[in-house]
């Protein structure tokens, strides 16, 4: 039996590397922004609000801030990768017609 190759080919390595680099850059920017936006009210709230002062220790504060950073990174990177994949697909369709 002949061996079959079931791997999908990417457009080419340079385009793929550029797409990943763009996704990581956008993800890092959004992670920094979302971390800053979440850090300020979290830290202020833990100093001012009695419930937060009593119940949120430093570990909880760090987890809240890091969860926002991680979510911002992955959501943005995923959107960038999907956008690039959609553009590649649309480009292939346009070339074939």
Image: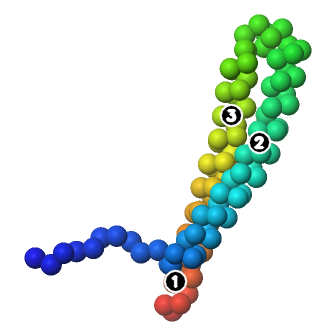
Q: Mark 2 points at which residue?
A: 34
Q: Name the residue under label 1.
A: 92
In the displayed structure image, the side of residue 2 where residue 39 appears, left or right:
right
Q: Quadrant of residue 52?
A: top right
Q: Name the residue under label 3.
A: 66
Q: Is residue 62 visible?
A: yes
Q: Nearer the viewer, mark 2 or mark 3?
A: 3
Secondary structure of the residue carrying tag 2 is helix
What residue sits 80% from the left and 32% below the top? 39
Q: Is residue 86 visible?
A: no
Q: Which of marks 2 and 3 is nearer the N terminus?
A: 2
Asked whether 93 or 51 is in front, the reply is 51
Q: How far apart are marks 1 and 3 (CA)?
A: 39 Å
In the displayed structure image, the side of residue 15 where residue 54 appears, left or right:
right
Direction left: furthest residue: 1
Q: Where is residue 96 in the image (x, y as percent from the top left)?
A: 49, 90
What residue sits 72% from the left and 14% below the top? 57
Q: Which of marks 1 and 3 is nearer the N terminus?
A: 3
Q: How far apart are marks 1 and 2 (CA)?
A: 35 Å
Reply above or below: 58 against 34.
above
What residue sits 62% from the left and 48% below the top? 74
């Amino acid at each position: 039996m002949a061996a079959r190759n079931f791997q999908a080919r990417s457009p080419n390595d340079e385009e793929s590397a550029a797409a990943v680099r763009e996704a990581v850059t956008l993800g890092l920017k959004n992670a920094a922004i979302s971390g800053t936006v979440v850090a300020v009210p979290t830290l202020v709230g833990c100093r001012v609000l009695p419930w937060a002062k009593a119940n949120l220790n430093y570990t909880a504060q760090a987890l809240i801030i890091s969860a926002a950073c991680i979510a911002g990174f992955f959501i943005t990177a995923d959107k960038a990768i999907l956008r690039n994949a959609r553009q590649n697909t649309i480009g292939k369709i346009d070339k074939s017609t």
